[in-house]
Image: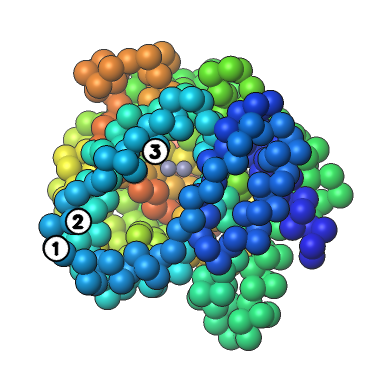
């Protein structure tokens, strides 16, 4: 186990962040994950980091703040915190986030307060966020087990056993269980590259999704859209992996080109709340109707963030057959669940997903077809019987996905 934890920390530093000599690394870590964060810190210094800056997070304190702090603070964002993110972003620091939240901790927190706080931070951190989303800074999101999260995923066993099982599941998902994880990642990246080459050369103008749970939607893709996956390129040219694990290839939809119905295939953990069995109806890109069996109010708040939150910003393909989905575990953590299933995202599109997009301003991006929003939230739609048909410029149709996997 310890050996694998070391290997995993090394993988995050060398492949995830791909830290460069004399680069600053900012780590955001839950206090429960402190021991692991320290191992990563050592690995980062060994790999040449100039300084490793820790940002400790405690979601239980965050919850108390939501319940007890003065009401007006949820519309505020402190200047020092804005300076913190922008300052490190502007010196080309790399950002590693350890995501390990308790999926149900925030269920009795007022969703309105949470969405106000999210909005205040998104507005304040727009410079930082747009640098991340156009890969001007290197970033990586990864997870390790916490007691509360492990118990939600494996409710039938002791806490200790649940944590062990979740470690195992994560090791499999990130290929740390293979003899040479760094090499396994390189093989995986070249496999995804083949898919990208096919999709980018074919340049479909639209994709049509259908399955038995009710998804039936036509999603247009902008001219000059670009598919990405398996790794991202930093401005200095080296490759990093923004999500560990990652199994997806993704691009942007046309913000006004989505028509039909999309039905979720997995619960969505949004800010410590679960939204379950939900669906959206789109007309000309806009959500005109929606429903959810559980967490409807939270979903309503998410959609109300701004106009762009009611439109799609990401189309991602993930085979039903992958090291994550083959484990048949519902992780209640988007990082894992999105990489076990085809998904879309509501909200902001990655500017890099259209040719030249990282150098475009807001108006140019919109004209190119990209959606803009303060939010970006992935939700899962993949099923065993999902069929995705690509439609070429001359209207010929090519199957991309049959029975949940690449055709
Ligand atoms: Zn995605
Ligand atoms: Zn996404």
User: From the viewer's perspective, is 403 left or right of 285?
Assistant: right
- Asked which quadrant contains residue 231, the reply is top right
Question: Cβ–Cβ below 8 Å for labels 3 and 2?
Answer: no
Q: Position of residue 253 (x, y in %)?
A: 34, 32
Q: Label 3 vs label 2: CA separation?
A: 19 Å
On whether ligand 2 comes within 8 Å of the CB at mark 2, the answer is: no
Quadrant in which the C terminus is drawn:
top right
Q: Label 3 vs label 1: CA separation?
A: 24 Å
Question: Cβ–Cβ below 8 Å for labels 1 and 2?
Answer: yes
- Within 10 Å of the Cα at label 3, are there few (<14), some (14-19), or many (20+) other Cα atoms? few
Tag on residue 84? 3
Q: Which residue is mark 1?
A: 71
* 186 vs 31, nearest the viewer: 31
User: From the viewer's perspective, is 247 left or right of 312?
Assistant: right
N-terminal label among 3 and 2: 2
Quadrant in which the N terminus is drawn:
bottom right
* 355 vs 191, nearest the viewer: 355
On whether ligand 2 comes within 8 Å of the CB at mark 1, the answer is: no
Relative height, residue 6 to residue 195 (above, below):
below
- Asked which quadrant contains residue 241, the reply is top right
Q: Which residue is mark 2?
A: 74
- Within 10 Å of the Cα at label 2, are there few (<14), some (14-19), or many (20+) other Cα atoms? many
- Within 10 Å of the Cα at label 1, are there few (<14), some (14-19), or many (20+) other Cα atoms? few
* 1 vs 196, nearest the viewer: 1
Q: Position of residue 143 (x, y in %)?
A: 58, 56
Relative height, residue 101 to residue 320 (above, below):
below
Question: Cβ–Cβ below 8 Å for labels 3 and 1?
Answer: no
């Amino acid at each position: 186990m310890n050996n694998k934890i070391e290997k995993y920390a090394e993988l995050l530093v060398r492949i995830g962040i791909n830290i460069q000599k004399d680069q600053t690394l900012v780590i955001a870590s839950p206090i429960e994950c402190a021991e692991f964060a320290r191992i990563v810190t050592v690995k980062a210094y060994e790999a040449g980091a100039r300084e490793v800056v820790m940002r400790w997070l405690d979601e239980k304190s965050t919850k108390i703040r939501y319940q007890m702090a003065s009401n007006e603070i949820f519309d505020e964002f402190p200047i020092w915190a804005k300076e913190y993110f922008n300052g490190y972003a502007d010196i080309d620091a790399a950002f590693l986030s350890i995501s390990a939240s308790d999926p149900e901790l925030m269920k009795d927190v007022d969703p309105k307060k949470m969405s106000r706080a999210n909005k205040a931070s998104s507005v304040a951190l727009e410079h930082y966020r747009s640098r991340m989303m156009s890969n001007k800074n290197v970033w990586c999101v990864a997870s390790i087990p916490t007691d509360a999260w492990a118990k939600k995923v494996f409710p039938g066993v002791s806490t200790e056993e649940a944590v062990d099982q979740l470690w195992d599941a994560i090791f499999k998902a990130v290929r740390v269980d293979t003899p040479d994880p760094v090499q396994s990642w390189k093989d995986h990246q070249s496999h995804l590259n083949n898919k990208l080459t096919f999709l980018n050369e074919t340049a479909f103008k639209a994709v049509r999704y259908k399955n038995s749970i009710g998804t039936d939607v036509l999603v247009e893709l902008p001219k000059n859209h670009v598919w990405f996956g398996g790794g991202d390129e930093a401005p200095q040219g080296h490759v990093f992996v923004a999500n560990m694990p990652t199994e997806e290839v993704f691009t942007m939809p046309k913000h006004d080109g989505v028509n039909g119905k999309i039905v979720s295939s997995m619960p969505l953990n949004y800010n410590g709340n679960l939204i379950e069995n939900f669906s959206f109806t789109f007309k000309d890109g806009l959500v005109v109707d929606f429903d959810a069996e559980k967490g409807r109010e939270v979903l309503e708040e998410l959609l109300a963030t701004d106009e762009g939150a009611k439109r799609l910003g990401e189309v991602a393909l993930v085979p039903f057959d992958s090291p994550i989905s083959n484990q048949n575990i519902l992780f209640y953590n988007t990082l894992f669940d999105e990489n076990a299933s085809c998904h879309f995202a509501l909200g902001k599109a990655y500017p890099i997903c259209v040719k030249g997009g990282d150098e475009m301003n807001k108006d140019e991006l919109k004209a190119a077809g990209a959606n803009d929003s303060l939010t970006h939230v992935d939700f899962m739609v993949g099923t065993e019987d999902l069929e995705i048909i690509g439609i070429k410029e001359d209207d010929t149709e090519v199957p991309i996905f049959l029975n949940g996997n690449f055709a």
